Image (cartoon, rainbow, N blue to C red):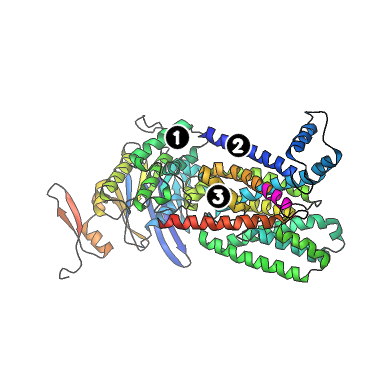
């Protein structure tokens, strides 16, 4: 069972934002979406999350059409971390995180909610902000709050003391540019959390990233989008070649041996004389 | 947490009962709290002897119905304001500001002035009900229009939505003005009532309107969790399992129903929908599970006290209650804006 787009196209007022894209988000793996600005990355993520309905094609989650599932059914199986959300009302951080428990409010106990919220807050490193008003936070801090909120939703009815989820169906975590407002150490913390949710707890993780080396380090497979079309989709090692990236991003990109081991992808200034 | 919240709701309920008793005691005939308590105790069978006949009649047929009207209308306006602020995701939304009250009044005024011509001989039969129905239709049309005009590509811009509401408000008030200009003397008297607000009206449609409001209020106070999620954003609420379109449709229709019925009973009473939720949030924070029921109670308390003031401040006459809430609410709103301004600067 996967979360998959089957030949999805999305057009609005004559402009095609996403054209005929088929990808799979596989449980236990991290799938990255990469591409220049305006390539249709966020649109594809919104189609996969069910936020928007494709003009043609289908989105399937766990063998069912996403368009035919209720918002609550979807919410119990996948969590979304959005790019940015503004909120004028001064909820405290802990309460914003606890909103992620809403899809399980009929089943879950107050105690389980509190346990999961505590763990998510400590994972997202926002313990020192827990009693602060959300609107007063910086952009990066807000993103970490939404990471914690997405985690308590993703965990559903799990007991985190158990090693992994079994027999409870697929779970998906979709992250829209999760690292954009974060400092370097929090970027890696977030990416590690995402990878751990996939590897250790079996979630299918999809995230839009911009950093080539983060893709090669944390993702298992990658979809490269360019002008609304899927240019390449497959294992990271096969797709993340300097030739492919240089062409898609219209910018020279080289692979350089890292003295510490492995290879890093670097972008150069376009004009050396400059 | 739960205990703290339940305690606050009980305290507000007691405060409401206290306001009702005080309000029963004051007015043209000074009856006094002591007599009111004796009368109430007598009515519910606690003590055998009641108060004198005159006081009993004033309380039973004049003050009690009017105060109950105030309690229900105040609760309706309070909770509607809180719901609208969440729906618009804007703390300064209020049924008065976004033209829902004015559109309801416009509907009512059209029916008062033109109803006879349109409904002909049926008007005498349906007139009393036609006016509240017209008020409700006006309120629903206004909310639907605001939502329709502010939608683009399936998204609503909350700030834009508020501005559209302001425009609708101006148009509806102009409409009320036009029909006021066309009205004859008898019609003018009932028109003034719609524009300034009063709890003294006692039309035959009162009971159905109050019943509608009560049901609407009981529904709206259950929307705490979905509206909390809505404050995160429409997409986020959807991702968290809320059928967003259904929630918006139901909340706007029921709010329009409650506000329309409130305007039908008492005319335009401004600021209660704004002031009650804000006072509540100062104490409880923004959690709608608490804000919604507490705003209903707060609105009821505010309107009960405002009504008491309206009845004693210009004795032997009485001030329209809309003027009282306006005089008190306007400065309160200014204070709110200034506080917001200071907070943003920091």
| Residue B178, visible in the rendered structure | yes
Badge 1 marks a residue whose secondary structure is helix
Mark nearest the camera among 1 and 2 is 2
Above or below for A199 versus B267: above
Q: Which disc is residue B116 wearing? A: none
Separation of disc 1 and disc 2 at Cα?
29 Å
x, y percent for residue A91: 46, 46
Separation of disc 1 and disc 3 at Cα?
29 Å
The answer to whether marks 1 and 2 mark residues whose Cβ atoms lie closer than 8 Å is no
> Quick check: A150 left or right of B85?
left
User: Which region is colored magenta?
Assistant: B305-316
x, y percent for residue B66: 76, 47
> Quick check: A248 left or right of B333?
left
Badge 2 marks a residue whose secondary structure is helix
| Residue B157, visible in the rendered structure | no
Q: Quadrant of residue A165?
A: top left
Mark nearest the camera among 1 and 3 is 3
On the image, numbered disc 2 is attached to which residue? B11
On the image, numbered disc 1 is attached to which residue? A113
Instruction: Give neighbour class at mark 3: few <14, some 14-19, many 20+ (Cα, 10 Å).
Output: many
On the image, numbered disc 3 is attached to which residue? B278
């Amino acid at each position: 069972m996967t979360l998959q787009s089957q030949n999805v196209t999305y057009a609005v007022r004559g402009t095609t934002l996403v054209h005929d894209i088929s990808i799979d988000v596989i449980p236990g793996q991290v799938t990255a979406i990469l591409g220049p600005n305006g390539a249709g990355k966020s649109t594809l993520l919104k189609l996969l999350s069910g936020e928007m309905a494709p003009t043609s094609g289908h989105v399937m989650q766990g063998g069912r059409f996403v368009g035919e599932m209720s918002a609550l059914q979807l919410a119990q199986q996948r969590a979304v971390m959005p790019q940015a959300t503004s909120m004028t009302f001064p909820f405290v951080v802990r309460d914003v995180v606890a909103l992620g428990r809403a899809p399980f409010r009929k089943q879950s106990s107050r105690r389980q909610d509190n346990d999961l919220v505590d763990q998510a807050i400590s994972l997202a490193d926002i313990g020192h902000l827990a009693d602060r008003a959300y609107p007063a936070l910086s952009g990066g801090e807000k993103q970490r709050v939404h990471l914690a909120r997405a985690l308590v939703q993703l965990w559903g009815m799990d007991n985190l003391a158990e090693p992994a989820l079994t027999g409870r169906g697929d779970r998906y975590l979709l992250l829209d540019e999760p690292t954009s407002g974060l400092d370097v150490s929090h970027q890696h913390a977030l990416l590690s959390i995402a990878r751990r949710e996939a590897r250790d707890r079996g979630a299918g993780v999809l995230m839009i990233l911009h950093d080539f080396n983060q893709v090669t380090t944390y993702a298992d497979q990658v979809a490269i989008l360019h002008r609304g079309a899927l240019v390449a989709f497959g294992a990271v090692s096969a797709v993340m070649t300097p030739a492919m990236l240089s062409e898609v991003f219209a910018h020279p990109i080289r692979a350089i041996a890292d003295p510490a081991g492995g290879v890093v992808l670097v972008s150069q200034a376009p004009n050396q004389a400059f | 947490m739960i205990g703290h919240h339940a305690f606050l709701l009980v305290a507000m309920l007691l405060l409401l009962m206290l306001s009702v008793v005080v309000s029963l005691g004051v007015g043209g005939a000074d009856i006094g709290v002591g007599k009111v308590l004796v009368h109430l105790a007598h009515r519910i069978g606690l003590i055998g002897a009641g108060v004198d006949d005159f006081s009993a009649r004033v309380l039973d047929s004049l003050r009690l119905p009017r105060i109950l009207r105030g309690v229900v209308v105040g609760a309706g306006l309070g909770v509607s304001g809180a719901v609208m602020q969440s729906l618009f995701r804007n703390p300064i939304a209020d049924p008065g500001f976004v033209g829902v009250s004015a559109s309801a009044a416009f509907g009512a005024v059209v029916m008062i002035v033109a109803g006879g011509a349109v409904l002909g001989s049926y008007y005498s039969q349906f007139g009393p009900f036609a006016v509240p129905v017209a008020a409700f239709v006006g309120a629903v049309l206004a909310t639907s229009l605001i939502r329709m005009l502010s939608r683009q590509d399936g998204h609503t811009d909350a700030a834009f939505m508020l501005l559209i509401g302001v425009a609708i408000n101006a148009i509806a008030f102009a409409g009320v003005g036009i029909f006021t200009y066309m009205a004859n003397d008898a019609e003018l008297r009932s028109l003034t009532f719609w524009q300034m607000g009063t709890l003294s009206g006692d039309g035959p449609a009162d009971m159905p309107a109050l019943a509608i409001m009560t049901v609407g209020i009981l529904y709206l106070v259950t929307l705490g969790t979905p509206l909390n999620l809505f404050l995160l954003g429409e997409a986020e609420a959807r991702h968290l399992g809320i059928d967003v379109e259904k929630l918006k449709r139901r909340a706007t229709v029921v709010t329009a129903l409650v506000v329309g019925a409130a305007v039908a009973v008492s005319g335009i009473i401004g600021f209660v929908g704004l002031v009650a939720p804000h006072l509540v949030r100062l104490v409880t924070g923004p959690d709608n599970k608490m804000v919604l029921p507490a705003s209903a109670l707060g609105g009821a308390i505010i309107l009960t006290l405002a009504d008491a003031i309206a009845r004693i401040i210009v004795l032997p006459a009485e001030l329209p209650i809309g003027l009282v809430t306006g005089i008190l609410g306007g400065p309160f709103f200014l204070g709110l804006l200034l506080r917001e301004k200071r907070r943003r600067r920091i």
